[in-house]
Amino acid sequence: MAMLLMFFPPSRKIIAFPTFLVSLAVSVLGYTPSARADYKLGTGDVIELSIAGASELTARVSVDLDGSVNVPIIGNFPARGLSLDVLRANLQSEFMKRQIPIRAPDGRTSLTSVAPEDVAVRIAEYRPVYLHGDIARAGEVPYRPGMSIRQAIAHAGGFDVARLRMSNPYVDTVEYQAQGTTLAQELAVEIERIKQLQAQLQRPSGAEAEASTQPMGSASNEANILAERLRMQQQDFTKQLHYILASAAFASSRAAVLTEQKSKEEEGSKADIEDFERSRSLFEKGTVSTQRVSDARRAMLLSSTRALQTAVEATRAQRESEEATRSSQQLQDQNRIRLLTELQDAMSRRTRITAQLSAAQQKLAIAGAMKSVWTQGPDAIVITLYRRDESGVENKIDANESMGLLPGDVVEVAIKVPAL
């Protein structure tokens, strides 16, 4: 905004605001007359023109790309690069050459010359300033006379510290340290689990598992408990295997004894059959009694029955031995499958925990970097001002938040984040 001088037309006499009001307006705007006089109009500035007694000619016009403003009656008029005072003087001079239609109170219109003091010109809107970089709402910011970079940044929502304030880096550091400690312990447990499982897979079947020799401590308690649990599982497997193998050995031994007994009883049964045949032949010749034949026949049947029973028992014992052997092999296969499955799961968990631990360490590093940004304060913010001079050359200026802005300035804000 700039100082506006208003003129009222009834008697075409200049009626200016009292001096103290003008001074008050200037002080409130914070825009000194010298600063106003030094300001050069540019493309995008909006000029308000008014002529005393000709309200219909009041207009707001913007400085076009060609640097001109479209003034009523006059048409395109050069403005870019001129101060407001120079533009006003030029317009006053131009209007003095012309007569404009003035509507009288009775409704009649007449052509009237324009006095210089009848022409009022002010800047209605300044070119915006532009903010980009680490700003909450980058883009245009309406310019106000006396605006500083700090005020423009505040108008744009402040610094874009979303990277830094997603969470408190001091709290994050503690959290990520705790995560890292927990994950490191879990990783140690999985490594111990893998080592124990691989050792059990390499150990001969039925061999006793060795007790963990790791020292007990807060960091290794869980690993020791795991090793003890795996050792007890292996001991239980070994006991079951030994029991099944003992059962197989007993059944095999019993089958061998019964087989030998069956062989002997088959020989005895054969001898009893021969004795029976011989007794029956002698009975037919009348040399032996009926009782002798009956006893031979009874002995033959008894030995045959006993031989048959022994053969059945030997077959059953052999089948039990084979089943026990098959059960022992099945138990060993199941134990190996269990160990391989647990080893595969442990390796998968180790991979996952390793990735999580790496992520936690990276987050911890980022949180540490964010802490350093927080502690840097203003030194972490770099502000660069780009401003064009009267010749149109853009100058790069190292700025700070207290520096004043001019319309059309471009402000680049960067928050320094230390390299990880």
Image (cartoon, rainbow, N blue to C red):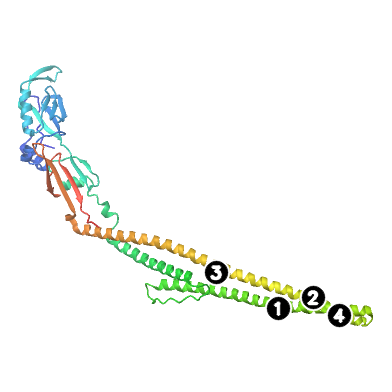
Marks 3/1: CA–CA distance: 32 Å
Which amino acid lies under the numbered mark 1 shown in the image of this protein? Glu
Q: Is residue 404 above or below residue 308?
A: above
Q: Residue furthest right?
A: 286
> Between disc 4 and disc 2, whose residue precedes?
4
Q: Disc 3 designates what residue?
A: 332
In the figure, is residue 26 to the left or right of 237? left
Residue 340 pos. (x, y %)? 48, 64
Which amino acid lies under the numbered mark 3 shown in the image of this protein? Gln
Q: In which quarter of the image is residue 244?
A: bottom right
**Mark 2 residue element:** helix
Q: In this view, does 1 lie above or below 162?
A: above
Which amino acid lies under the numbered mark 2 shown in the image of this protein? Thr
In the figure, is residue 314 to the left or right of 379? right
**Mark 3 residue element:** helix
Mark 1 or 2, closer to the camera: 1
**Number of on-image labels:** 4
Residue 296: numbered disc: 4
Q: Disc 2 designates what residue?
A: 305
In the figure, is residue 83 to the left or right of 142? left
Q: Return the residue nearer the eye: 277 or 154.
A: 277
Which amino acid lies under the numbered mark 4 shown in the image of this protein? Ala
Q: Is residue 236 above or below residue 338?
A: below
Q: Disc 1 designates what residue?
A: 260
> Between disc 4 and disc 1, whose residue precedes?
1
